[in-house]
Amino acid sequence: MAVFDGILLTSLNGLALAAVLFMVAVGLSLVFGTMDVLNLAHGSLALGGAYVGVVFLGTGGGLGQLVLAMIVATIVGLAAGLILSLLTRGIRDHLKQALLTLGLALIAADLMRLAFGGDVKSVAAPSPLDGTIEILGRPYPTYRLFVIAMSLVVGGLLYAVIERSLSGAIVRATVADRVMVEALGIRTKVVLAAVFSIGAALAVVGGLLAAPVLGAQPGLDNTILLLALVVVVIGGLGSIKGAALGAILVGQVQTLGVALLPEFASFLLFGAMAIVLLVRPGGLLPAAHAEVAR
Amino acid sequence: MKHHTQPNRPRAFALAAITIAAMTVTGCGNSLAQTDAAAETVKVGLVVPTSGVYEPLGVDMTNGFQLYLDQHDGKLGGKSVELVKADEGDGPDTGVPAVNKVILQDGVSVVVGIVNSATALGVKESVAQAQVPLIIANAGANDVADGSDYVWRTSFANGAVGASLGEEVAAQVDGPVYVIAADYAAGHEFAGGFIDAFEAAGGTIAGESYTPFGTTSDWQPFLTQAQNSGAKAVFAFYAGAEAVNFVKQYSQFGLAGTLPLYAPGFLTEGGVLVAQGAEAVGILTSLHYSDLLDSPENEAFVAAYVEAYDTPPTVYSVQAYDAAAVLDLALADVDEVDGESIQQALHGIGAIASPRGEWSFDEQHNPDQPYFLREVESVDGANRNVVLRTLTE
């Protein structure tokens, strides 16, 4: 019984990690799936969000500070996404995109180290959420449940906008046939810049929400980028449902898998990715419209 | 291969010319160094991380070494010191070339520093070959210091730090203890040292978990295992970012109030102690230093350190400060400054009066030193490692 409780709690932790990964990976997936831009600076955006958390919530705070931090993170993300979309606009070659964004990621990492130092920074959960809730007779940190809830809200909104609204239809149409959308009188450059900005903002907010769980330190950007890339590869490019499924899978592999088979920890993640690639090379749930972009 | 195309030739010639020019310049540097040596100066290579994840340790070590120099007019053993610094970086890929660079290119007589154990293991053969003594001021892998004439350590051996808690925990905890550590060489050495000493003192182990190093962000599964094991206390080894997340989760998942946490002092040393916040209070650790040690030597050291750098010293500062003290004693006995004579002098320096208390090199060239039981307390709103008592002499 006690063992079973432990496993349930562990999978709940897996969901919390999945929630954070989803927020970061969905932006990466949309930008690659719709704009065909491989953005390796995506992890830096998430770490930037974590440092926003350090500034606004570092020594604890209330819900007010959390809302303020989320607004700042959104603005930072929108601005960074706009700059990234301008920089990568003319570059169609994936290798060149990778080199450019990786270079930007290295510069960003050094700038953040200059500003915040090389030490680990921890971020306190905001005050009504910093306690614990009793689950199955064991205390469980409330903040993690909040992260799961936030991720569900964001995912739901995003799905509704992209798949069910007119602006979502324009985004999907731009992916499918840029020239035709231009012919309809819509400026696709603006559409693509908006997608990039929103994707970047999601990464920064995701990093902010992750900060009380993962902390903030140099190197976290690469960890998050790697996990997000695996999520996108597993889930399939350009699809929100795919990112969600990939995030849940990676979250469970990274927590439940590591707990049950600690000696295979470094193998499990990429083992899971390899199996998915063997069975479904396009990922589990790739976007139907992303394929047309080839 | 190189000669199969014509256009490459001029470039190859240019390269060769530059290479030869560079070799000539280096040659000059070496002959200059030799004339310097006659004028009673000693070239010391300080190899610590000035970039990467261990940068904060490198800063503390540089400060500690520099403080000793400043207190002694820039001289060690009466000889002026010319300090050559090189960046150790994160691991042996950068650390080994840095050590080789100060030995071969700068021609130093002794190397001080080294944070990373893999780097220390990677250079211990080559310093012996080059006959340049290496004074390790941090790297703790058990096998680094093995009595080799050219390898000396002013810091600690991982197993010895773990072992220092064995008797104490066996005496204080009424029941079995759960061991949890990072799954890499150091984690196993700290845990192994503790388990051997703890079992020798009559304790029993409830269980062991070794968590994937660098990829674990979630300790709940291992903490749940510890709770279910019937253990009455937990022994843990973590450092850096993992130390922060582990301590926070130990508290968040409700273990902090019920199971006392014992650990090697690195769990709560330096920057991580600030980041851990209130959740670190009550953790019991063992280490060979705390800035709150109650001794005249330490009070003078802390006052001078705070005066110079505006921050309290860490164990890393003391290890480097003592490396300078060791060199001071050895160089006073040396007529001709070269690696061979420094190494011979190191064998006979005897006891070192240090801020951590008096210690001397043992047969392996590890420090034979006291360890202190420390408890994290909130002093004036800031976390400090308060010394409870001395564990081993």
Image (spheres, helix red, strand yellow):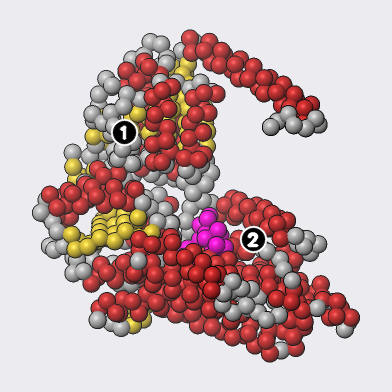
The amino acid type found where label 2 is placed reads Ala
Is residue A272 positioned above or below B112 on the image?
Answer: below
Decide whether the magenta segment is chiefly helix, strand or loop: helix
For this view, does B262 lie left or right of residue A47? Answer: left
Residue B144 visible in the current orientation: yes
Q: Quadrant of residue A84?
A: bottom right
Q: Is residue B193 magenta?
A: no
Which image quarter is the N terminus of chain B in? top right
- The magenta stretch is A210-226
Kindly identify which residue carries mark 1: B145
Mark 2 burial class by Cα count in 10 Å: few <14, some 14-19, many 20+: many
For the point 42% across and 14% down, the residue is B337
Q: Secondary structure at mark 2?
A: loop
Asked whether A55 or B84 is in front, the reply is B84
Asked whether B205 or A232 is in front, the reply is A232
Kindly identify which residue carries mark 2: A41
Residue B267 visible in the current orientation: no
Asked whether B21 or A72 is in front, the reply is B21
Q: Is residue A224 magenta?
A: yes
